[in-house]
């Protein structure tokens, strides 16, 4: 369709159009090549610019030909036919004819007389000169084409800035879909448990980075898993989800056991490490909850050396908000944990805000 349109357009419309489009695309692609340091884009932009230069040369030659036209075809030579009336006739008295030798005279029967040829030549009408061809306004066509397609070029140039475009801006990580993954038997024995994918979808909020105090960061990874609690022989379902940013890592898990939050706090009191773990009780969404702190574990495996790995080390400090599954606190809880490689932690109020926005969606899913 585009090729047909270019063939139909007049020369003074088609060529300015090709120059405008070629220059706009060439400059745009070269700009992207410089920004992204792409040799492939630079080559494509150079092709557009060379094509545009050829079209400009063609238009310049056409303009020069219009301004300095060459000599036209030579006019046909006019043949002058002598007038028979002016032809000189010799005087019979001066013509000497031998008396004894007869002079034969051969006259063609069908030869036209000289006077008839002249009469026919005079009677033949000459072709009248037609009206002069109308000279098209080449400059007007060129300016009109540049004006129309200049607007198109501006739309192409400003389009990516006005409308969203597919560029190289990193996109937030999305949760993996593992609906067909077979759940452990502990999930079949647990009434209305959530899965790791459901926890991931609830936690992976667009405003999660803003709630953490790092609004310009985007999620690097987002994952969910359907595991079981440790030291339970696979009998306690414990799905979890994890969202990782450059600064913080957020983990959300659900433990479906029969231990209440009050019993957990009592265990801290018995062990005598309530102050060490900075345990604080509160209520979130009308449910009993408590804060606790503990160090993460750091594993380091070196695949460059066979059968060698560093021992388990103590990782950075993590802050956890545990919220009871039910208002009556009859067992089970949600854990919302945040930590960072630098060891910095957000305020406890940040974890409460996240829990109040994330847990309602999790509770809604577990109700079905």
Image (cartoon, grey):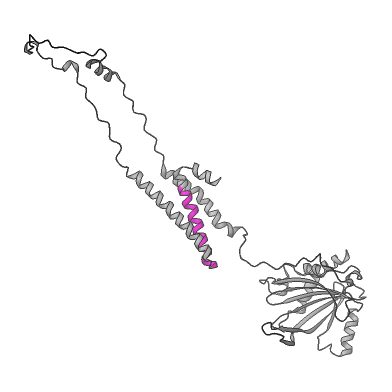
* Residue shown at the point (79%, 84%) measured from the top left: 293
Q: Is residue 49 left or right of residue 212?
A: left
Check the image and report above or below for 81 versus 178: above
Q: Looking at the rendering, in which quadrant would you find the N terminus?
A: top right
The image shows residue 357 at horizontal and vertical percentages of 79, 69
* Residue shown at the point (49%, 58%) measured from the top left: 26
Check the image and report above or below for 102 versus 221: above
Residue nearer the viewer, 100 or 49: 100
Residue 35: say if magenta.
yes
Task: Using the rendered image of the protein, determine whether residue 241 is visible from the camera's viewpoint.
Answer: yes
Q: How many marks?
A: 0
Residue nearer the viewer, 95 or 339: 95
Residue 329: say if magenta.
no
Q: Seen from this angle, which residue lies furthest top?
A: 99
The image shows residue 35 at horizontal and vertical percentages of 53, 67
Q: Quadrant of residue 258?
A: bottom right
Question: Predominant secondary structure in magenta?
Answer: helix
Check the image and report above or below for 121 versus 20: above
Q: Seen from this angle, which residue lies furthest front?
A: 101
Task: Using the rendered image of the protein, determine whether residue 146 is visible from the camera's viewpoint.
Answer: no
The image shows residue 221 at horizontal and vertical percentages of 71, 72
Q: Quadrant of residue 246?
A: bottom right
Magenta part of the protein: which range?
15-36
Q: Quadrant of residue 136?
A: top left
* Residue shown at the point (78%, 78%) measured from the top left: 337
Q: Looking at the rendering, in which quadrant would you find the C terminus?
A: bottom right
């Amino acid at each position: 369709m585009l090729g047909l349109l270019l063939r139909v357009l007049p020369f003074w419309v088609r060529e300015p159009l090709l120059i405008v489009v070629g220059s706009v695309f060439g400059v745009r692609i070269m700009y992207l090549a410089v920004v992204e340091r792409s040799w492939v884009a630079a080559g494509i932009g150079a092709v557009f610019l060379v094509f545009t230069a050829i079209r400009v040369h063609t238009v310049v030659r056409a303009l020069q030909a219009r301004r300095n036209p060459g000599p036209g075809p030579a006019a046909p030579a006019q043949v002058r036919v002598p007038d028979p009336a002016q032809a000189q006739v010799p005087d019979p008295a001066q013509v000497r004819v031998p008396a004894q030798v007869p002079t034969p005279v051969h006259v063609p029967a069908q030869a036209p007389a000289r006077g008839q040829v002249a009469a026919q030549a005079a009677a033949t009408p000459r072709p009248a000169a037609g009206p002069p061809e109308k000279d098209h306004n080449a400059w007007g066509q060129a300016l009109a084409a540049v004006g129309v397609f200049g607007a198109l070029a501006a739309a192409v140039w400003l389009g990516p800035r006005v409308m969203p475009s597919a560029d190289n801006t990193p996109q937030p990580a999305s949760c993996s879909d593992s609906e067909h993954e077979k759940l452990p038997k502990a999930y079949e024995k647990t009434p209305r448990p959530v899965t790791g994918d459901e926890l991931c979808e609830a936690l992976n909020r667009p405003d999660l980075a803003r709630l953490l105090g790092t609004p310009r960061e985007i999620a690097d990874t987002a994952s969910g898993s359907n595991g079981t609690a440790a030291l339970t022989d696979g009998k306690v379902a414990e799905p979890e989800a994890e969202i990782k940013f450059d600064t913080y890592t957020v983990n959300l898990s659900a433990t479906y056991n029969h231990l209440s939050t009050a019993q957990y706090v009592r265990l801290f009191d018995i062990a005598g490490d309530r102050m060490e773990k900075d345990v604080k009780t509160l209520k979130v969404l009308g449910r009993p909850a408590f804060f606790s702190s503990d160090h993460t574990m750091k594993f380091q495996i070196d695949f460059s050396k066979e059968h060698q790995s560093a021992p388990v080390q103590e990782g950075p400090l993590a802050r956890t908000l545990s919220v009871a599954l039910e208002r009556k606190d009859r067992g089970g809880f949600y854990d919302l944990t945040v930590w960072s490689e630098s060891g910095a932690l957000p305020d406890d109020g940040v974890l409460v805000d996240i829990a109040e926005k994330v847990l309602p969606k999790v509770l809604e899913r577990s109700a079905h």
